C-alpha cells in the first residue's frame, strides 16, 4: 500500500521516542512553520484538512476549535486516557512517538491561543508516561515549550497528568473533573460544553492523542494534501487497532474510506485473515461501545459516515474480529461486565442498570437463563438508551450507559438463537 | 430582574411565564406540574444525578429527555412531562433504584414519609423484575454518635454529601468507590461531627440516614405536628415540632426564607430531649421539700410582703426572663413594676449586651445582612453563637453577594470564609473598630507606628480600605468573651454610629428571647415597647396603675447587693446565674447570702440547687405564645404537649403571685396578655389576633410593623419535610398589615413616648495595660455548653474546661503542655492543667465559658471578677 504514513512514519526506528531522532526526521519543523503563520491560518489549515477527531465521536477538529468561547484564558487538554478494551492505537503513539504528540499539541495550543496545555495519560501507561514526560522535558530544553517558544513571542506550558485508573476519565468532562482534582464524574451537557465552560470554568478544547499527532503532517504538507486522501468527510489516514481472531493483530495506518473491513481483515499486509481460516461471525467496528456488525457488512468502507449509516460507528478505530468459534453471549457479557465495573455510579440508570445487565448476562452464560430474560435485557437496555437505536438516546448523563446495549442488545438481535440455546441447554455450548 | 426579561414556555401544551436562569423543575413547580425528584433540593446546587426528573425538552435536535432539575428554561422551550417516553423513563429509573434497595419498609423509620415509597407508588412499576441477589452492606454504620447510615437503603442522590460540603462547609462525608459499589462514608475514623449533621437525616429521600434519638421512636402516621420557633439560641429558626401520645418525638426544620431556609443545628433539632432530662423539676419545692403550689406561692408572697414592709421594693429583684415567651415576660414585667413596685428586673445575666445596643441601633435583618456588600463581624464565633446565621452568611459569601471583615481575638469558624480577619488583643476590639471608622489619614501613614489592640497598622489600613470601598456595611455585634465587659461592645457601636451613620447592625445575643424580654420591659431601665422609664413611666401608669420610679438594678448590681447581704428576695426567672453570670464566685456568694432565692425554672440547674423555693414551669413545646429573635422578628411558639407534673406556665406564676399580694394583672389566659400588649404597647400595635393566627404558619414579622406583610405558607406534613413548605401562597386580601389602612392605635392616644435610640457617646475605656507577666483571658461561649438543652444530647463532643495557651507563653513560664499550673486572677487563684494551642494568639489564655468542668480544671467563671473591663491572669509553673 502506498498510503503516506502520517503518524507512524518513525516507528521503524529503535530510538523513535528521542528528540534526536525526532529532529533528524524533520521534527519540530511544523511547529516552527506554524509559529510563522497566524493562529487563524493554522486553524484554517486544520479546517481545510477536515480532520475528524480520532477519539471516538469523530467531530471535525477545525469546527470544534471554532466553537471555543472568546476568552482571555483558554485551555487545551489532550485526552490520552485510552482505556477501552481492544483500543491500543494511542498507546503506541504515546510510547513510540511522544515528540510528535507534543509537537501536535503545541501547534494546536498556538492555533487556539492556549498558553496552558495538559496531556492526560492513562495511569496504567507506565512506559507512556515516562516517554511523554521525557519528551516534554526535552522539548522544554529545546525551546519548543516555555516562554517565547522558538523566539516566536508565543509562550505555552505543558503539563502531563497521569489518570488514576478509571475508564470514565476518558469521557472528556470526567477527564476535566479529574484534572481539577475531583471525582471523575462526567458533567451534564447540555447546557454547557467544554468549549464554553471547560477546565476550571474556562473554555477548553479536548482532543485525542491521534488527532494531535496528525497536526505536524497537516501543517507541513497543508490541509489540502490531507483532505486529498480518503473520501467524503473521512479524510487522511487513520490508525486502526485490529484485534481478535485475525492472524496479524496490530495497529495499521491506512487511508480512510478506501479500504473495507474485509480488506483490513484479509489483506496479507494487514490482518492476514482469520485464525485457522475460520469464518467471521461478527465484528465490532469501532471499539467496545460500538454496535456489532455481521459478516454481511464486511464490505463497508472504513468511512465514518458509511459506517454510521449502517448503524454503528468507526469510533476509536479499533476493530475486533470474532470468528465462528466465539460464544456471542460470553463476548457480550464480557463487554457488559467491563462497563459495569467502569460505571462511575453518578447516575441511576448506568449505575444500577449496568450491574443488573451484567448479572443477567452472566446467569445466561452460566446456564441459568430464562427465556423472559431476553425481553428483560432488551427492556433494561431500553431504559438506559430509549429506543435502543444508534446513535443512541440516553437517560444517563454520559454515553457510557448507552454503550452497554451496543453489545448486549445487538448480540441478542443478531444471535437470538445462540442465547436460546444457552437457556434451553442450561449452559454454554462453546465451553 | 424586570418583567421584560420574562418569556413564555410551554409545559404540557399550556403557556407559562418563566424567568431567565430558572430551572425547568422550578418552572414546573410554579405551574403546579409535579415532576418527581430525589436528588434535587431547592437550597442546593443541582447535580442531575438521580434522573428521576427526566422530562422531554425541545432543543436544536428535537425533543430529548433532559434532567429538569439541571436544565435552565429557554424562551419558547417546549416541555413535556407526561409523554409515554417520560413515563417509561420514570418507570425505568424507579425500577433501577429499587433493584438494590432493601424492602425493609415495615421496619424503616422513613416508611410512611418516604419519597422513594411515595414516588414508587405514583410513578413506578407495579413489581420488580429483579431476581438476582441484592447488594449487601453492614447495616447500619455510625457516622457519628448521632447519625447512622444504612448503605443498603442509600440511592446515591448526594443530598447529604452536598449538604455537608456546600451548605455546612463540613466535608466530612463523601462518596467512596464507584459504580454500584458507591457508598457514602466518613474518612477513616473521623466522625461526622458537624453541628449541622441532623439536616442530612431530614433531607435524605430514603431511610439511609437516621438519627439515633428518633430511631424506632415512632411511625410518621402516628405523629401530630405544629409549627414553632426554636429557642435553642436567639436565631429563631422555624421548625415543626412533632409529638405522639403527648410526648415530643422529633423536630424538623421549615423552609423559612428569611430565617433558617429549612436548616437546623443539631442543638436545636434534638433539643426536645431536654424536656425529658433527669434534671427536669415537676413539683414545687420549699427548702428542697416537695410542697403544694399553694404553700410555695404563700411562702414567696410572705417573703415579698415582708421585704416590702421592711427593706423596701428595691430589695426585691428579678433576674432572667429571656427563656420566656414574650407574653410571659410582659406579665412578669408588669408584676415587678406595678405589684412589687421595683424596677430591679434584668433579662440578661451579665453575659449579654447593653440593652440599647440590642434594641436601639438601626437594625439589619439576616436577609439584609446577607445582602450587604460588606459585613463586619465584631465579637463571637457565630458558628458557636448562632449556627444558622453562620450558614446564611457562609452561603452569601459563597454566592459572592457579601464579603466579611472579621474582628476577633482568635481565628473562628468564619475566618476561612472572611475577606480579611483582624486578630486583636482580647478586650480591645473597640480600639480596632475606632481606628477603622475614624476619618483621617491612613494609620500606617500617620507615623504613629504602634499596633492598635495588637493589630498591625498596615492591616488596619487594608481593612479601612475594605470599609471605605463598600457602598454599605452591616456590623454584626456580640460578646466575643465573657471575660471582658459588654461596655467594649457598646463602645464599638458608639464609634461606628458616630462615624458611619449609614451603618446598620445585627446584634447577636445568645439566649433565645433576650430581644423579646427587653421589648417586654425585663430590663432595669426599659418599659415594654423599648421605652425608657423616664420617658414612659407616666404612659404606663395610665395603663397599669403604678410604675416604680427611676432605673432599677442590673443583674450584676443585684448580685453584688445580694452578696453584701442587702437583698431580701431574688427571683430567678428561668435563669442560672451561677453558670451564666461571668463571675461565678459573685453569683454563688449572692445566692448563698441569705436572701430568699426563688427559682422559677423547668430544670434543676446549678442556681436552682441553691434556691429556697423552686417553682416548676413548662418549657419549649409545652407552652404557646411568641418569641422574638435577635433581628426583632416575632414568631409563634406552639404548645404541642402538656407540661409534666405540676409545671405551670411562667405567666400563670406571675398571676398567682400577684393575686397572693393583693394585685390583679388582669390576665386569665395568654391570649389576654397578647391582647393587652397589642392595645397598650405601641411596639406591638397591629399584631392583632388574626395576625397571631396567621403567624402560626409564617416566617414571623419584624416589629414594629410598617406595612409588613404576613405571608401564610402552605405546609404539607406528608411531603418531604422541609421542602414542600417552600411554596408561598400569594397574599390574600385582609391578611396584610398596612400602616396607612390600619393606623397604629397609639396615634389616637394623647402622647406615645418615643422608642429608645442608641445614644451612648464614645469615650475612652481605661483598659489596663497587659503586663509582661500576664495573659489576657478569653472565655468564649460554645454551642455545646453546660446548658440544660444540650445536657441529654449524648454523644456530641463538648469541649471541656481546658486552659489553652500559645506555646510561646508556656515556654516563658517553663511549663509543658499537660503540666499543672497555678492560675491567678483578681477573682482568686486556682490550679489547672494547661494545654498548648498555637491557634491562640500570644499573650492570651483561653477557657471556653460554661462548659463541664474537666477533672481538676478551673472554670472560666472562677477566674472572672465582677465589674472589670478585662480579665488578666498570671500562670505560674508548679
Image: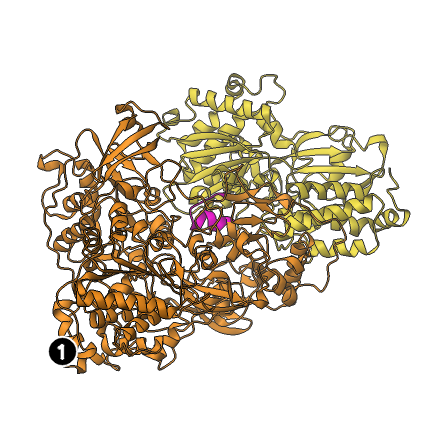
Chain colours: A yellow, B orange
- Residue extending farthest to the right is A425
Q: Residue at x 50, y 65 (%)?
A: B242
Is any atom of residue B807 visible in this view? yes
Q: Is B616 rendered above or below residue B682?
A: above
User: How packed is label 1: few (under 14 Cα within 10 Å), some, or many (20 or more)?
Assistant: few
Q: Where is the N terminus of chain B found, in terms of image quarters? A: bottom left
Residue A96: x %, y % from top left:
59, 23
- Front-most of residues B559 and B40: B559
Q: Residue at x 73, y 40 (%)?
A: A260
Q: Tell me, yes or no, whether the highlighted magenta stretch contains residue B447.
A: no
User: Relative to residue A86, is residue B355 drawn left or right?
Assistant: left
Q: Tell me, yes or no, whether the highlighted magenta stretch contains residue B167.
A: yes
**Chain on which label 1 sits:** B
- Front-most of residues A290 and B522: B522
User: Relative to residue B100, is residue A35 drawn left or right?
Assistant: left
Residue A409: x %, y % from top left:
74, 51
Q: Residue at x 44, y 43 (%)?
A: B797
Residue A423: x %, y % from top left:
86, 49
Q: Magenta residues? A: B161-172
Q: Where is the C terminus of chain B found, in terms of image quarters? A: top left
Q: What residue would you read off at disc 1?
A: B751
Q: Which corner quadrant of the image does residue B257 belong to? A: bottom left
User: Relative to residue A4, is residue B225 drawn left or right?
Assistant: left
Q: Is A310 rendered above or below residue A341?
A: below
Is any atom of residue A27 visible in this view? no
Q: Residue at x 39, y 75 (%)?
A: B694
Q: Classify mark 1: helix, strand or loop.
A: loop
- Front-most of residues B653 and A177: B653
Amino acid at each position: 500500500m502506498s498510503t503516506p504514513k502520517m503518524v507512524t512514519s518513525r516507528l521503524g526506528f529503535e530510538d523513535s521516542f528521542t528528540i534526536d531522532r525526532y529532529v533528524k526526521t524533520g521534527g519540530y519543523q511544523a511547529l516552527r512553520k506554524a509559529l510563522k503563520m497566524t493562529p487563524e491560518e493554522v486553524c484554517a489549515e486544520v479546517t481545510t484538512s477536515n480532520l475528524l477527531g480520532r477519539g471516538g465521536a469523530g467531530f471535525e477538529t477545525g469546527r470544534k476549535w471554532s466553537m471555543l468561547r472568546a476568552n482571555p484564558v483558554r485551555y487545551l487538554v489532550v485526552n490520552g486516557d485510552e482505556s477501552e478494551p481492544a483500543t491500543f492505537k494511542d498507546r503506541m503513539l504515546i510510547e513510540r512517538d511522544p515528540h510528535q504528540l507534543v509537537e501536535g499539541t503545541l501547534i494546536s495550543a498556538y492555533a487556539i491561543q492556549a498558553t496552558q496545555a495538559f496531556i492526560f495519560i492513562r495511569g496504567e501507561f507506565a512506559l507512556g508516561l515516562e516517554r511523554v514526560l521525557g519528551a516534554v522535558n526535552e522539548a522544554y530544553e529545546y525551546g519548543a515549550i516555555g516562554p517565547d517558544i522558538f523566539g516566536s513571542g508565543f509562550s505555552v506550558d505543558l503539563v502531563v497528568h497521569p489518570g488514576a485508573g478509571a475508564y470514565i476519565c476518558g469521557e472528556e468532562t470526567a477527564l476535566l473533573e479529574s484534572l481539577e482534582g475531583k471525582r471523575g464524574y462526567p458533567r451534564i451537557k447540555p447546557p454547557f460544553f467544554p468549549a464554553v465552560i471547560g477546565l476550571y470554568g474556562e473554555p477548553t478544547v479536548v482532543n485525542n492523542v491521534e488527532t494531535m499527532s496528525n497536526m505536524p503532517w497537516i501543517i507541513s504538507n497543508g490541509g489540502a494534501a490531507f483532505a486529498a486522501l480518503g473520501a467524503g468527510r473521512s479524510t487522511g489516514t487513520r490508525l486502526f487497532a485490529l484485534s481478535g481472531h485475525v492472524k496479524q493483530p496490530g495497529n495499521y495506518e491506512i487511508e480512510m474510506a478506501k479500504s473495507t473491513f474485509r480488506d483490513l481483515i484479509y489483506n496479507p499486509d494487514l490482518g492476514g485473515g482469520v485464525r485457522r481460516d475460520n469464518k467471521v461471525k461478527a465484528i465490532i467496528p469501532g471499539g467496545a461501545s460500538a454496535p456489532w456488525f455481521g459478516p454481511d457488512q464486511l464490505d463497508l468502507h472504513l468511512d465514518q459516515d458509511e459506517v454510521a449509516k449502517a448503524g454503528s460507528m468507526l469510533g476509536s478505530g479499533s476493530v475486533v474480529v470474532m470468528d465462528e468459534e466465539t460464544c456471542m453471549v460470553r463476548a457480550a457479557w464480557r463487554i457488559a461486565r467491563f462497563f459495569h465495573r467502569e460505571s462511575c455510579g453518578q447516575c441511576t440508570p448506568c449505575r444500577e442498570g449496568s450491574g443488573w445487565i451484567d448479572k443477567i448476562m452472566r446467569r445466561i452464560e452460566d446456564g441459568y437463563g430464562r427465556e423472559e430474560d431476553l425481553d428483560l435485557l432488551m427492556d433494561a437496555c431500553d431504559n438506559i438508551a430509549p429506543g435502543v437505536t444508534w446513535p443512541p438516546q440516553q437517560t444517563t448523563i454520559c454515553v457510557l450507559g448507552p454503550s452497554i446495549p451496543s453489545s448486549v442488545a445487538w448480540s441478542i438481535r443478531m444471535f437470538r438463537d445462540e442465547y436460546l440455546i444457552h437457556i434451553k441447554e442450561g449452559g454454554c455450548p462453546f465451553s | 430582574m424586570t418583567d421584560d426579561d420574562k418569556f413564555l414556555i410551554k409545559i404540557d401544551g399550556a403557556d407559562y411565564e418563566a424567568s431567565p436562569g430558572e430551572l425547568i423543575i422550578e418552572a414546573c413547580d410554579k405551574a403546579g406540574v409535579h415532576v418527581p425528584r430525589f436528588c434535587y433540593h431547592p437550597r442546593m446546587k443541582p447535580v442531575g444525578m438521580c434522573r428521576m426528573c427526566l422530562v422531554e425538552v425541545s432543543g436544536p435536535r428535537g425533543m430529548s429527555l433532559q434532567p429538569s432539575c439541571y436544565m435552565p428554561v429557554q424562551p419558547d422551550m417546549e416541555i413535556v412531562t407526561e409523554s409515554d417516553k417520560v413515563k417509561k423513563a420514570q418507570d425505568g429509573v424507579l425500577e433501577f433504584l429499587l433493584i438494590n434497595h432493601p424492602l425493609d419498609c415495615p421496619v424503616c423509620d422513613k416508611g410512611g414519609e418516604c419519597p422513594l415509597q411515595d414516588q414508587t407508588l405514583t410513578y413506578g412499576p407495579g413489581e420488580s423484575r429483579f431476581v438476582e441477589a441484592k447488594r449487601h452492606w453492614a447495616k447500619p454504620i455510625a457516622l457519628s454518635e448521632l447519625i447512622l447510615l444504612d448503605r443498603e437503603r442509600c440511592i446515591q442522590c448526594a443530598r447529604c454529601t452536598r449538604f455537608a460540603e456546600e451548605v455546612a462547609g463540613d466535608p466530612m462525608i463523601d462518596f467512596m468507590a464507584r459504580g454500584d459499589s458507591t457508598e457514602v462514608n466518613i474518612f477513616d475514623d473521623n466522625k461526622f461531627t458537624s453541628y449541622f449533621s441532623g439536616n442530612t437525616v431530614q433531607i435524605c429521600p430514603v431511610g439511609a440516614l437516621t438519627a439515633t434519638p428518633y430511631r424506632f421512636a415512632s411511625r410518621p402516621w402516628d405523629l401530630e405536628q405544629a409549627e414553632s420557633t426554636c429557642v435553642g439560641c436567639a436565631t429563631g429558626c422555624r421548625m415543626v415540632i412533632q409529638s405522639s401520645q403527648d410526648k415530643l418525638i422529633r423536630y424538623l426544620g421549615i423552609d423559612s426564607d428569611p430565617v433558617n431556609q429549612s436548616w437546623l443545628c443539631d442543638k436545636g433539632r434534638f433539643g426536645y430531649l431536654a424536656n425529658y432530662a433527669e434534671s427536669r423539676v415537676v413539683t414545687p419545692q420549699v427548702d428542697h421539700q416537695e410542697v403544694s403550689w399553694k404553700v410555695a406561692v404563700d411562702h414567696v408572697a410572705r417573703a415579698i410582703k415582708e421585704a416590702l414592709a421592711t427593706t423596701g421594693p428595691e430589695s426585691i429583684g428579678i433576674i432572667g426572663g429571656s427563656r420566656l415567651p414574650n407574653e410571659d415576660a410582659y406579665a412578669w414585667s408588669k408584676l415587678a413594676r406595678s405589684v412589687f413596685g421595683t424596677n430591679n428586673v434584668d433579662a440578661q445575666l451579665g453575659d449579654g449586651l447593653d440593652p440599647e445596643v440590642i434594641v436601639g441601633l438601626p437594625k439589619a435583618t439576616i436577609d439584609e445582612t446577607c445582602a450587604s456588600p460588606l459585613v463586619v463581624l465584631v465579637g463571637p464565633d457565630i458558628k458557636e453563637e448562632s449556627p444558622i446565621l453562620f450558614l446564611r452568611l457562609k452561603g452569601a459569601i459563597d454566592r459572592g453577594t457579601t464579603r466579611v471583615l472579621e474582628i476577633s481575638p482568635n481565628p473562628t469558624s468564619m475566618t476561612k470564609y472572611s475577606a480579611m480577619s483582624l486578630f486583636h488583643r482580647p478586650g480591645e476590639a473597640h480600639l480596632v473598630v475606632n481606628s477603622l471608622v475614624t476619618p483621617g489619614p491612613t494609620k500606617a501613614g500617620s507615623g504613629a507606628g504602634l499596633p492598635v489592640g495588637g493589630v498591625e497598622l498596615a492591616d488596619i489600613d487594608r481593612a479601612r480600605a475594605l470599609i471605605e470601598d463598600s457602598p454599605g456595611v452591616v456590623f454584626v455585634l456580640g460578646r466575643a468573651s465573657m471575660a471582658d465587659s459588654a461596655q467594649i461592645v457598646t463602645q464599638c457601636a458608639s464609634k461606628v454610629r458616630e462615624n458611619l451613620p449609614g451603618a446598620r447592625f445585627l446584634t447577636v445575643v445568645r439566649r433565645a428571647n433576650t430581644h423579646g424580654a427587653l421589648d417586654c420591659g425585663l430590663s432595669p431601665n426599659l418599659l415594654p415597647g423599648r421605652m425608657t422609664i423616664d420617658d414612659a413611666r407616666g404612659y404606663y401608669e395610665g395603663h397599669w396603675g403604678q410604675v416604680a420610679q427611676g432605673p432599677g438594678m442590673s443583674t450584676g448590681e443585684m448580685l453584688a447587693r445580694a452578696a453584701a447581704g442587702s437583698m431580701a428576695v431574688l427571683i430567678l426567672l428561668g435563669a442560672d446565674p451561677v453558670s451564666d453570670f461571668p463571675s461565678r464566685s459573685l453569683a454563688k456568694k449572692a445566692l448563698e447570702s441569705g436572701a430568699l432565692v426563688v427559682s422559677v425554672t423547668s430544670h434543676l440547674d446549678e442556681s436552682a440547687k441553691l434556691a429556697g423555693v423552686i417553682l416548676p414551669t413548662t418549657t419549649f413545646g409545652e407552652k404557646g405564645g411568641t418569641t422574638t429573635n435577635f433581628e426583632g422578628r416575632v414568631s409563634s411558639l406552639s404548645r404541642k404537649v402538656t407540661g409534666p407534673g405540676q409545671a405551670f406556665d411562667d405567666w400563670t406564676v406571675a398571676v398567682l403571685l400577684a393575686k397572693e399580694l393583693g394585685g390583679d394583672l388582669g390576665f386569665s389566659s395568654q391570649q389576654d396578655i397578647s391582647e393587652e400588649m397589642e392595645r397598650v404597647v405601641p411596639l406591638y400595635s397591629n399584631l392583632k389576633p388574626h395576625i397571631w393566627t396567621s403567624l402560626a404558619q409564617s416566617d414571623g414579622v419584624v416589629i414594629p410593623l410598617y406595612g409588613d406583610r404576613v405571608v401564610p405558607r402552605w405546609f404539607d406534613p406528608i411531603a418531604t419535610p422541609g421542602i414542600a413548605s417552600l411554596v408561598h401562597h400569594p397574599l390574600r386580601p385582609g391578611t396584610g398589615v398596612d400602616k396607612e389602612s390600619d393606623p397604629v392605635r397609639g396615634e389616637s392616644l394623647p402622647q406615645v413616648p418615643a422608642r429608645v435610640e442608641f445614644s451612648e457617646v464614645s469615650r475612652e475605656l481605661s483598659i489596663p495595660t497587659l503586663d509582661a507577666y500576664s495573659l489576657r483571658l478569653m472565655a468564649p461561649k460554645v454551642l455545646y455548653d453546660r446548658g440544660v438543652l444540650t445536657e441529654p444530647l449524648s454523644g456530641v463532643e463538648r469541649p471541656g474546661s481546658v486552659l489553652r495557651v500559645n506555646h510561646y507563653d508556656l515556654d516563658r513560664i517553663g511549663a509543658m503542655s499537660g503540666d499543672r499550673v497555678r492560675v491567678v486572677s483578681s477573682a482568686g487563684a486556682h490550679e489547672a492543667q494547661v494545654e498548648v494551642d498555637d491557634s491562640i494568639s500570644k499573650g492570651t489564655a483561653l477557657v471556653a465559658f460554661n462548659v463541664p468542668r474537666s477533672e481538676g480544671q478551673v472554670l472560666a467563671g472562677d477566674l472572672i471578677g465582677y465589674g472589670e473591663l478585662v480579665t488578666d491572669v498570671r500562670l505560674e509553673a508548679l
